[in-house]
Every structure is written in C-alpha cells, then in structure tokens.
Image: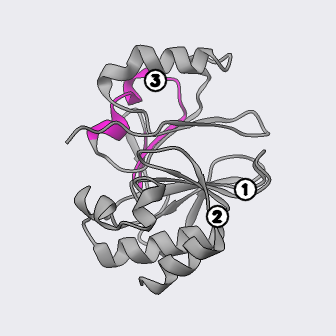
Amino acid sequence: MRANCTCTLVRCRDGTNVIVDTMTAWDGEHLRALLGEHGLGVGDIQVVVCSHGHSDHVGGNYLFQKARMHLVGACASHRDLYMDHFGRGKQDEELVLDSHAEVVVRRSPGHTLGCVSVIVSNSQLGGRVGITGDLFERAEDIDDESIWKDAGSESETLQRKERSKMAQVCDFIVPGHGPMFQVTQSMRSKLKEEI
C-alpha cells in the first residue's frame, strides 16, 4: 500500500495559520513550496494539527519549530512540554484554535483511538468544513466501506459513529486521502443508517 495524506492550510480571520496533516518526512520541500504559493513560510504557521500519529500525516512536523502548538491526535505539545488540553473529560470536548472560536479540534476516534478532526465554521465556502484525517479516506468510501476498513480501523463501531456525526455537522469534508467533497443529505442518511 502507498499512502500520502491530504494536507490543509487554514487561515483564520484573526491571523492564526493552522496546518492540518503535514505529509511524510520526504515532502518538506514540497510543503515549503505550497506554503510559498500562499505567501507564507514555515515560520508563519502558529498551530500544527495531525489527525493521528501515522507517518504519512506527521512527517513534516519538523518544519514548524516556531509553532506555538503541535497536536498529534489528542496529544498537544510545544517542544518538550506536553499539555492536557482534552483531559480525560467528555468525548465531545473541543479545543479552540483561534480567537473567534471558528476553528476547533474535536476527538474523532475510529481509524485510531486518538484521532482528531478540525472543524472550520464560517468558511469562505459558505458552510462548515470538517478536516477529518482518515475518518474518511475519500468520498468514495461512503458507498464502499471496504475503502476505509482496508485502511485500518482500531474501532469500526466508533468510526461509523464518528463518520455519521461529522457528516451531520459539516457541509464539506476534507478526507485523509482525497479531495474535499460536499456532504449531501443522502450521504448523511446513509452514514446514519450504518451506525
């Protein structure tokens, strides 16, 4: 199997720049070039979020040494200081990343038990965007669940539940290994039926 993740830049209204899933360690120069296309350098990223700890999602983290926070799944750190942002509290607890509370991280276990997703409200697309990591591999896995199952799931039951929850609250989804797609009512219904 070959895999490299979808990498997403979120530019918040308050000036906070968030990068979600940093690809592999061999993608550093490519990632620098992509940021450059947006007039940014690696030092302009304040928050790094990796949906989970697999190497195709965390490999470029080394580039962002000036970021105030790195989140790998539910584990947050800055240098060698680890922060307990989620604690052992509620599953639906969210971590706010910007001063307008429009970009939040929430737990979304399934692919791994520590997975997180980023939810962007008030997006330029006119709706809420979920950047889900491997909760969704790509849009096609809604009709063919073997796609996400074959990619591995530490809890198929939780993953089904989280996929449905994410589809209910988001208008668009950026999956872990494919282009963003718009969530339709039929997708929401199908995912809810599968719980």
Q: Amino acid at mark 1?
A: Ser
Residue that numbered label 2 is attached to: 170
Question: Circle 2 sits in a helix, a strand or a loop, which is it?
Answer: loop
Q: Is 20 above or below relative to 62? A: below
Figure quadrant of the C terminus: bottom left
Tell me: 181 left or right of 193. right
The image shows residue 148 at horizontal and vertical percentages of 32, 61
The image shows residue 166 at horizontal and vertical percentages of 55, 68
Q: Is residue 134 visible?
A: yes
Figure quadrant of the N terminus: top left
Q: Which mark is residue 65?
A: 3
Q: Residues within 10 Å of mark 3 (few under 14, many from 20)?
A: some
Q: Is residue 89 visible?
A: no
- Magenta range is 55-77
Q: Amino acid at mark 2?
A: Cys
Q: Is 152 above or below relative to 27? A: below
Work out whether mark 3 precedes mark 1 in sequence or the reverse, and give the earlier one.
Answer: 3
Reply yes or no: does residue 71 show up in magenta: yes
Q: Residues within 10 Å of mark 2 (few under 14, many from 20)?
A: many
Q: Residue at x 23, y 59 (%)?
A: 150
